[in-house]
Amino acid sequence: MYCVQCEQSNKGGCAVKVGSCGKTADVADMQDVLLRVMQGVSAYADRAAKAGARDAEVDAFTPYAWFTTLTNVNFDADRFTALIGKALAMRDKAKACAVAAGADLSDLPEPATWNPGTTASELAAAAPFAAIQRFMDRDGPSVVGLRNLILYGLKGTAAYSEHARVLGTEEAAVSAEFHRISAFLATDPTDIDALLAESLAIGALNLKVMELLDAANTGRFGHPEVTMVRMTPVKGKCLLVSGHDMGDLEAILQQTAGKGVNVYTHGEMLPANAYPGLKQYPHLVGNYGGAWQDQQKDFDAFPGAIVMTSNCLINPEIKGYKDRIFTAGPVGWNGIPHLTDHDFGPAIACALAQPGFAEDAPEQRIPAGFARNTVMGVADTLLGMIKAGDVRNLFLIGGCDGARPGRNYFHDLAMATPRDSLILTLGCGKFRFNREDLGDINGVPRVLDMGQCNDAYSAIQVAVAVAGALGCGVNDLPLHYAISWFEQKATAVLLTMLHLGLRKIHLGPTLPQFLTPEVLGVLVEKFDIRPTGDAGEDLERMLQAA
């Protein structure tokens, strides 16, 4: 094992039997093998696309396979053995598609023909040839760091693409571009400028993917509405839904209707409470708990069943809820029941067998639903407040939260922002301050919850629209960014922001280990990325620059 893909990695990387996230070395090695094979799949799919052909099954499998390798998603070694076998079959399909189209198959990269085997012992022996650090001595830390930036950016983009795909929204052009960049990575490139250019190409691709996901969510569930979401339990049997997959949540709501089970969201699923198509179910009663890193405490205290639909899963064996948690989609943990085909019957039966909440807790609610459509619907009001000086600054504070020290920075920054400023927030980073009463400006709440991490698309659209209405560039707005980085979805969103030319992004609390000092120097020079420091000093610098 060697893993540096997320903020919880040990200093210098996780090179141990069990990583900080609970992933074993065997699973980490198989994830490396799977991704190397998937780059071979893309090598053929890219050649096929250039010849005007594609295989829909290959395109559908690709984002799912990449998604399983994200931080805190799938820890099940047996599932990865099966996934690698299927990936090899998909590589054969992609090759057959390319051959049938008359594609040029000369000078194929090594992953297109590499044979890692299919048994656990064969895969273990092959893993060193797929390890992300294998070329460190030959190519140096800057090249390997940029390759990792591409690898992890593709992972995040794949996750968002899979979220859209399971809702029935995908585009051949998106799949083709993903394969093109993955095939580029398969060549083990060394040119710094080309690596940086492809990193920004991922940002452009991820913007398109987030647009597709926004269309998938709003097309299926309607545009989010401003909603006061209950944050405290109500009496009765209960089922908790965590992760990001609102299609799974909808299926659970449909299958629990009339059965006396109250459904709660958790973590990144909180924004689902603002979608008309979901909040029409009266037994969607609100949100329980906080961000993903608190799930062991939250899940242990929850007196019902739990379904994890996507990242971020933490070891369920430490606390006493292993017998009432279920996984779905790309998620997996050895020994935990995995639900397929949107059949949540076992989880519902488990919920009915649990005690549930004995009584109502005192009611507490927070506002949500300030997505793109909502904010743009009051654009004239917002612009009027900016022009009148009632709103002097906008802050985007959010992203992926985590457990390490230093993340109170985002709470402290939010609390210190001037009262004539609005805070746009998204992702689970909002749990650092979303229950604080920061007041309002002319009836508009100062904290505007725009949704999940993928709803960075909403924030970008609002910023572009405000800049256009004011006749200036986005970087000329009094808009300040404080982004909590954690894992690969955040990497993809960051690359999208860089692709759009956004500057002066405060990123933290620690910067990604996979980026070498040399690579960070390039990003700082080109985009003025700033590591988070003291919240008060950073705020003063932001306000002076406005």
Image (cartoon, grey):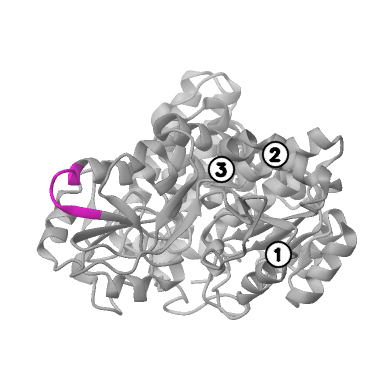
Disc 3/disc 2 C-alpha distance (Å): 16 Å
Describe the element under mark 1 as helix, strand or loop: strand
Disc nearest the viewer among 1 and 2: 2
Q: Residue beneath label 1, please?
A: 507
Few, some or many C-alpha atoms within 10 Å of disc 3 (few <14, some 14-19, many ≥20)?
many
Q: Residue beneath label 3, please?
A: 371
Tell me the quarter of the picture where residue 266 sits. bottom left
User: Residue 90 or 424: which is nearer the viewer?
Assistant: 424
Looking at the image, tell me whether mark 1 or mark 2 is earlier in sequence order: 2
Magenta-highlighted residues: 255-262
Whether residues under marks 1 and 2 lie with C-beta atoms below 8 angstroms apart, the answer is: no
Q: Can residue 172 be seen in this view?
A: yes
The amino acid sitting under disc 1 is Leu
Residue 381 circle label:
2
Whether residues under marks 1 and 3 lie with C-beta atoms below 8 angstroms apart, the answer is: no
Describe the element under mark 2 as helix, strand or loop: helix
